Image (tube, helix red, strand yellow):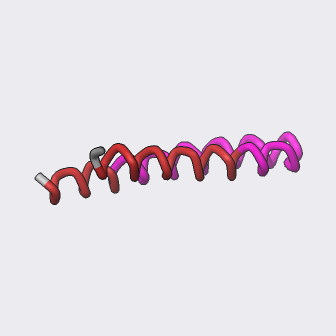
Amino acid sequence: MKIKTIITGISVCAAAGTVAYAVAAASNSEKRMLKKRTSRAMNAIGEVAQGIAQIMG
């Protein structure tokens, strides 16, 4: 297995679980703010995964 795939999968699953929990307990205004923060977090995770992939070659 490739390490990049494993790391990406774990990151996405952790983020999805966190988001699902937060959405279930949030009000409408909190949901909008959560959507923005989630988008930024997913972009950051993608950048980290790309950086790791570049380091590993």
| Residue under the point 87% across and 49% down | 25
How far across and how far down the image is residue 9, in percent? 46, 44
Q: Quick check: is 30 in the magenta stretch?
A: yes
Front-lying residue, 38 or 57: 57
Q: How many labels does the image show?
A: 0
Q: In this view, does 37 lie to the left or right of 47?
A: right
Residue 31 place in picture, x, y as percent: 77, 43
Q: Main secondary structure of the magenta part?
A: helix
Q: Position of residue 32 (x, y in %)?
A: 73, 41
Q: What stretch is highlighted in magenta?
A: 20-47
Task: Work out whether 28 lies above or below 21.
Answer: above
Residue at the outermost left position: 57
Image position of 33 (left or right of 40): right
Question: Which residue sits at x=85%, y=48%?
Answer: 26
Residue occupying the far front of the picture: 1
Quadrant of the frame with the N terminus: top left
Identity of the residue drawn at 24% across and 55% down: 51
User: Which quadrant of the structure image shows residue 36?
Assistant: top right
Left or right, 48 with respect to 43, comes to left
Q: Horizontal and vertical percent for residue 27?
A: 88, 45
Q: Describe residue 10's horizontal placement relative to residue 55 as left or right.
A: right
Q: Residue at 68% across / 52% down in the picture?
A: 18
